[in-house]
Amino acid sequence: MSSTFRAVHQVARPDGAPGAEHFAVVEHPLPAVEPGTALAENIYLSVDPYMRELMDEEWPLHEPLGYGRAIGRIVRSEDPDLQVGDLVEHGGGWSTHALIQHGYGRVIRPAAGVATATYLSVLGATGLTAYVGVREILRVQAGEAVYISAAAGAVGGVAGQIAKLTGAAHVVGSAGSAAKVRHVVERLGFDAAFDYHDGPVAELLAKAAPNGVHAVLEGVGGDHLEAAIGSTREFGRIAWVGSISQYNHPDRPPAAPRNLYAVSDRSIHLRGYQVRHFMHLRQEAQIWLTPHLQAGRIVADEQIVDGFENVVEAFLGVMRGDNTGKMLVRVGEE
Amino acid sequence: MSSTFRAVHQVARPDGAPGAEHFAVVEHPLPAVEPGTALAENIYLSVDPYMRELMDEEWPLHEPLGYGRAIGRIVRSEDPDLQVGDLVEHGGGWSTHALIQHGYGRVIRPAAGVATATYLSVLGATGLTAYVGVREILRVQAGEAVYISAAAGAVGGVAGQIAKLTGAAHVVGSAGSAAKVRHVVERLGFDAAFDYHDGPVAELLAKAAPNGVHAVLEGVGGDHLEAAIGSTREFGRIAWVGSISQYNHPDRPPAAPRNLYAVSDRSIHLRGYQVRHFMHLRQEAQIWLTPHLQAGRIVADEQIVDGFENVVEAFLGVMRGDNTGKMLVRVGEE
């Protein structure tokens, strides 16, 4: 094994859209494995929209970036809970190796027929976000009409499939291209989808769900949230999990929905959530999702980029909406 | 009995604040009491902020105004459920008399020590709105900090008292004058209150509840809702029951809260509601509230104006915020 590892640093704070110039890859000596720690060689790294928010404050400059979910294999261990050879999911960020403190790595034993990468997509925080939204927050009921924005994205694609399996009668998605619209309907089984570039989102949604919707999973913000509010029926529910449209300009949020008052007027629940508040449902979600994955009733929709040198570009692509499904970077051999 | 009755008509649609010029009092012949109807002579009429919304569309021009809650006494009846002499609560609007269709009047038998007017305030839709907000939507728990806007208003004043009786540790209200602030604290038992003219609402609320609040009952909208969102803790709840600040300009809603994204970021529930969706809780609310009223633990905070000729001015006063507590108009003898 080499005596060094590579890590992505953030080297500048962006004003607006992030670019390659805000990052650098830096080589570091491998850290010492003290008692209570273990060293993992990473296999898959996750790149996610929420990281854009970390870039403004939480990620320090000129240090290896933390927080990002990853799967690695233990290569040295002074932690009795982690053995050399174990596959471990952890939050060590965009590095080829990670030193895992005791209690911060979770051993993965992939279920039969389930690929390792799935533990960063449908069986990871992404799938948990979708599961919490559809089943814990929205509590979608059989027969309901459901709208899911960013349906070709990592969370939206899983959420639509969960909604269908939960009995939703009509699941409508929005996505950013004709190809994504086809993907969402043909591969992920949405009942309908539209390209939000084809007109005002509110009008497109009203056409796709002419009787309104009972429940919405919204992660875009701006006019997508406004359209969601406009289409939600009396007593309807909106789970609002993020606002990718504003992450590049947190100081200049989009005009909040002009129709926000409908939330009061139609007795709507607008419930925000962050998956970090629902980690206690992780096991429940895995138990629910795994047999559906094994039976092919849920598609693990992933886009896997090869090579550690491509991690920043993969992230920038997610922020541009280039991806369909969960974007992962393969940085090592299983 | 006279052969005529008087009714308020709306004669023009306002553009902005309503005025006396939008209304007229018109004399009509008393209607025939057909089988299945009964005639009530009204005693109390309710004037409420939601009526401003009716003025834009629902209230027809040049007809007696419907929807308003009233209490009257039956003077003629062809309805076996309503007997001459019965006190009846109904939605017949701003008239001296009302013809009540079968099933649209509810007989009131005031509990010992409870004034008739109370059935249009704490025991009417106003008190039900407060009860639903605090106990059904917010589910306020013992020890929590609660913020209530428009605390000197009809709904807010009852809501604060219910929150205290439910065990809230710190109930903060906002109101529109120093006199109202004193009233809310000294007479209604709020723990703290501030005059929203004294500075930015968000700053005043942050000072009155420095650790944030668990639950909010909001009925003003605009910067009051923004302040509420800003002060709500992780997983906190906001019951949003109306938006009096925008009723005069429904086509120009106030800038929706610039901090709306905090609803997603702090996993807040923003739940809109209209009391018409919760009429099934009316009996539960009366059963809960009545003994508290009888024991003096809840103050029926009413402002009663005398004379049918003053009903429009009483309503305009509510829209200007002149009232403390529930504004009622006495138009007949009990």
Image (cartoon, coloured by chain):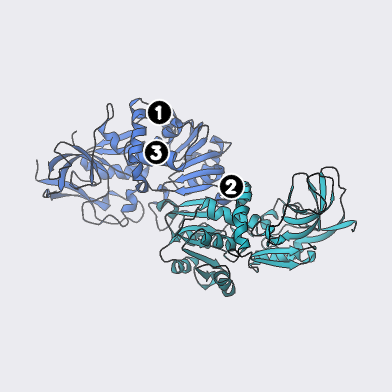
Chain colours: A cyan, B blue
Front residue of this view, candidates A41 and A286: A286
Identity of the residue drawn at 38% across and 42% down: B129
User: Left or right: A248 with respect to B304?
Assistant: right
The residue tagged 3 is: B131
User: Disc 3 versus disc 1: distance between alpha carbons?
Assistant: 19 Å
Query: Dot 2: few (<14), some (14–19), or many (≥20) neighbours within 10 Å?
Result: some
Q: Quadrant of residue A291?
A: bottom right
Identity of the residue drawn at 28% across and 26% down: B113
Comes first in the chain, label 3 or label 1: 3
The residue tagged 2 is: B266
Tell me residue B237's x, y (percent): 51, 43
Tell me residue B249's x, y (percent): 39, 54
Query: Dot 1: few (<14), some (14–19), or many (≥20) neighbours within 10 Å?
Result: some
Height in image: B106 above or below A153? above
Tag 2 secondary structure: loop
User: Disc 2 versus disc 3: distance between alpha carbons?
Assistant: 26 Å
Three-letter residue code for mark 2:
Arg
User: Left or right: B333 with respect to A34?
Assistant: left
Three-letter residue code for mark 3:
Tyr
Tag 1 secondary structure: loop
The chain ID associated with circle 2 is B
